């Protein structure tokens, strides 16, 4: 059983049944999946993505500076963190959103001590704004934060139940990996489960990463308990 986990939720997961935006039903489902983890005494830090609204790379150009585009991407993640923490609290899952960028009229500023203090009170901590610098993804930000917050593992939930040698939604003969080394995840041209920068941080810091399906009931708890689910990259 891990003591403290970092859960990475991408924008795609938060948009749930919709083409974009925020699916409240999905957020309630996630709250119910996290409750048993907290009940087990495991501390939960969440890094949220923003792809359900805007990714920096999508809107840069035609006059929008790359830095501005990434700042807008970070704002997307902040919208998710505000909505997600509200829903978690409404579902009686005590949660605080913290921002890596200065926006304290909306969300408290992230500091290591503040995050730690919430975790010690058994609150879920949801981080918006990634790591607060442009040209990064929230996957890389998740690994960086996991290192800073001393999380034992990073759990990235996806649409499929792990990493395959090819897209299992397109190929019936796709084979799932139970385990992968960082090097295999980095070097394989067909594996694109996280950007290389994120896997590079994981490798440097020896941080295990679990890739598993969000929508399998109990998966987050099983992964947090140290059971084998999805694919373990280590
Ligand atoms: N972003 C950034 N710095 C960070 C994290 C994110 O600039 O530390 C921006 C980046 O433009 C990214 C966007 O925020 O495209 C949304 O994050 P991401 O694409 O990782 O979201 P996800 O794909 O997980 O939904």
Image (cartoon, grey):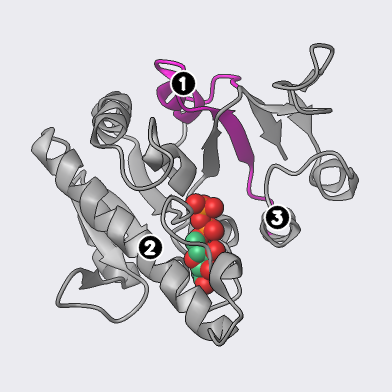
Camera-nearest label, 3 or 2: 2
Of the numbered discs 1 and 3, the one sitting upstream in the chain is 3
In the image, residue 48 lies in the stretch drawn in magenta: no
Question: What is the secondary structure assignment of the residue under circle 2?
Answer: helix
**Chain part drawn in magenta:** 205-229
Residue at 76%, 28% (x, y): give it.
167
Q: Residue at x 17, y 41 (%)?
A: 87
Q: Secondary structure at mark 3?
A: loop
Q: Nearer the viewer, residue 179 or 40?
A: 179
Q: CA distance from mark 3 to mark 2?
A: 19 Å
User: Which marked residue is nearer to the observer: mark 1 or mark 3?
Assistant: 3
Q: Which mark is residue 131?
A: none
Question: Which element type, helix, strand or loop, lies under badge 1?
Answer: helix
* Residue marked by disc 3: 195
Q: Is mark 1 within 8 Å of ligand 1?
A: no
The mark found on residue 219 in the picture is 1
**Disc 2 beta carbon < 8 A from ligand 1?**
yes
C-alpha span from label 1 to label 3: 23 Å
**For residue 213: magenta?**
yes
Q: Residues within 10 Å of mark 2 (few under 14, many from 20)?
A: many
Q: Position of residue 220 (x, y in %)?
A: 44, 27
Quarter that holds the C terminus: top right
């Amino acid at each position: 059983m891990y003591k403290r986990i970092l859960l990475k939720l991408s924008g795609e997961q938060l948009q749930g049944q919709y083409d974009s935006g925020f699916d409240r039903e999905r957020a309630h489902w996630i709250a119910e999946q996290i409750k048993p983890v907290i009940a087990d005494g495991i501390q939960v830090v969440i890094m949220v993505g923003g792809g359900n609204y805007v990714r920096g790379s999508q809107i840069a150009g035609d006059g929008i500076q790359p830095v501005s585009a990434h700042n807008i991407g970070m704002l997307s993640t902040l919208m998710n963190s505000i909505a997600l923490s509200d829903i978690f609290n409404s579902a009686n899952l005590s949660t605080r959103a913290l921002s890596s960028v200065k926006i304290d009229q909306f969300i408290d500023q992230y500091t290591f001590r503040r995050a730690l203090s919430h975790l010690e009170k058994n609150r879920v901590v949801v981080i918006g704004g990634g790591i607060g610098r442009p040209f990064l993804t929230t996957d890389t930000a998740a690994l960086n934060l996991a290192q800073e917050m001393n999380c034992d593992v990073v759990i990235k939930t996806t649409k499929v139940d792990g990493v395959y040698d090819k897209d299992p939604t397109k190929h019936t003969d796709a084979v799932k990996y139970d385990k992968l080394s960082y090097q295999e995840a980095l070097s394989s041209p067909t594996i694109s489960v996280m950007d290389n920068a994120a896997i590079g941080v994981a490798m440097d810091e020896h941080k295990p990463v679990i890739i598993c399906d969000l929508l399998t009931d109990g998966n987050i708890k099983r992964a947090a308990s140290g059971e084998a689910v999805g694919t373990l990259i280590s």
